[in-house]
Image (cartoon, grey):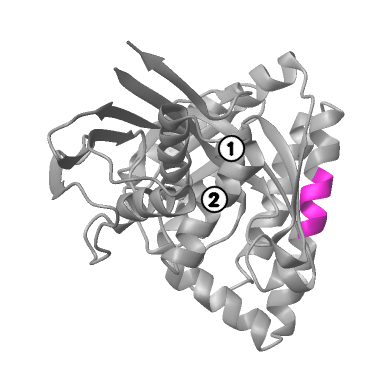
Amino acid sequence: MIIRSKAPLRLGLAGGGTDVSPFSDIYGGSILNATTSLYAYCDIIPTNNGEINFYLQDKNIKYTYKSQKELPINGEIDLLKAIYNRIIKDFELDALSFDIHTFVDAPAGSGLGTSSTLVVAVVGAFSEWLGLPLGEYDIANLAYSIEREDLKLAGGKQDQYAATFGGFNFMEFFAEGKVIVNPLRVREETLNELSRNIVLYYTETSRNSSDIIQLQQKNVTQKNVQSIEAMYKLKEQAIMMKEALLKNDLDEIGNILNIGWEYKKQMAKGITTQLFEDVYASALKAGAIGGKISGAGGGGYIFFYCPQNTRYNVIEALNKFGGKVRRFEFTLSGLKTWKIE
């Protein structure tokens, strides 16, 4: 038997960063994101050989451990081991023996929520295999807890919920970890046109998002007025983006992205780089209305809204910087799990 799962990577369209504590706990956060046709995948094959084998297929790496109830957290694939440890602990299970294969369509540190999406995919596969009583909110919250509480990795909450629920969602974040996911009923023609007009560009750079996020958290804790005011504006931007999507006012989306990018850069140092500024300026000159970096910033993907047929000119301009344009579609479904006998 093989247990399979896949969870979609997301683009944060508006409000990014307001889902990070302590801002979300004190002031409340609002985010609008959408999932893409890029995925994190997981396959689990139960065995009885007394081993746990991790195959990281996108990196061509294998790790082997003896079957035990708790795997060591020692800097070696801790994310995957922490998921196993938490499943065993929370559901009071005996040690398991299995092979697990993972693959992600985008590199780590690229700003599409790869790590959190992979956690959701792996938790989903375990839930399918073991028949765990986990709903969508349960899976997303467990994935968040493993990353932020068990492993103390800095970050927000949106990625886990986006990967689990899928589609276009307006998310609200409150004190004590409360999250409300509001799915948006986006018309099919809007979905198709938005997929057509957004150009996703990988700069061939990556970053450690936790460094930027920790600076952002420090700014909130120390009551940095500029940073906090920028986050308030990003919350407003999320509401504006929701209205534009529901009204099918697609060109306004580009304007909102442009405004949001300016405020996002004020949250913390390191969000932008000279490369990103040059790429952004060239894209706008070629016909894009607006855009933003995906994720915390500092590296990875950046995307632009390109109305009419300007995408071709924008792509030509972007290709001069040595990165890659990545084709994708927006999708309406989240985590999927299934079995093959």
**What span is in magenta?**
235-240
Secondary element type, mark 2: helix
The quarter holding residue 133 reads top right
Q: Position of residue 252 (x, y in %)?
A: 79, 38
Q: As displayed, is residue 310 above or below residue 299? A: above
Labels 1 and 2: the sequence-earlier one = 1
**56 above or below 109?**
above
Q: State the SS at label 1.
A: loop
Question: Image quarter for residue 250?
Answer: top right
User: Is 256 situated above or below 164?
Assistant: below
User: Closer to the camera, 3 or 314?
Assistant: 3
Rounded to the nearest angstrom, the CA distance separating label 1 from label 2 is: 9 Å
The structure residue drawn at horizontal position 46% and vertical position 59%, both measured from the top left corner, is 147
Residue 134 is tagged as 1
- Given residues 339 and 175, the one toward you in this image is 339
Q: Is 281 situated above or below 72?
A: above
Q: Which residue ends up furthest to the bottom in the rendered image?
A: 222
The answer to whether any part of residue 210 appears in the image is yes
The N terminus lies in quadrant: top left
Give left or right: position of 76 versus 252.
left
Q: Label 2 belongs to which residue?
A: 142
Q: Amino acid at mark 2?
A: Leu
Q: Is residue 239 magenta?
A: yes
The reply to whether the C-beta atoms of the residues labelled 1 and 2 are less than 8 Å apart is: yes
Determine crowd level at label 1: few under 14, some 14-19, many 20+ residues with C-alpha closer than 10 A.
Answer: some
Q: Which mark is residue 194?
A: none
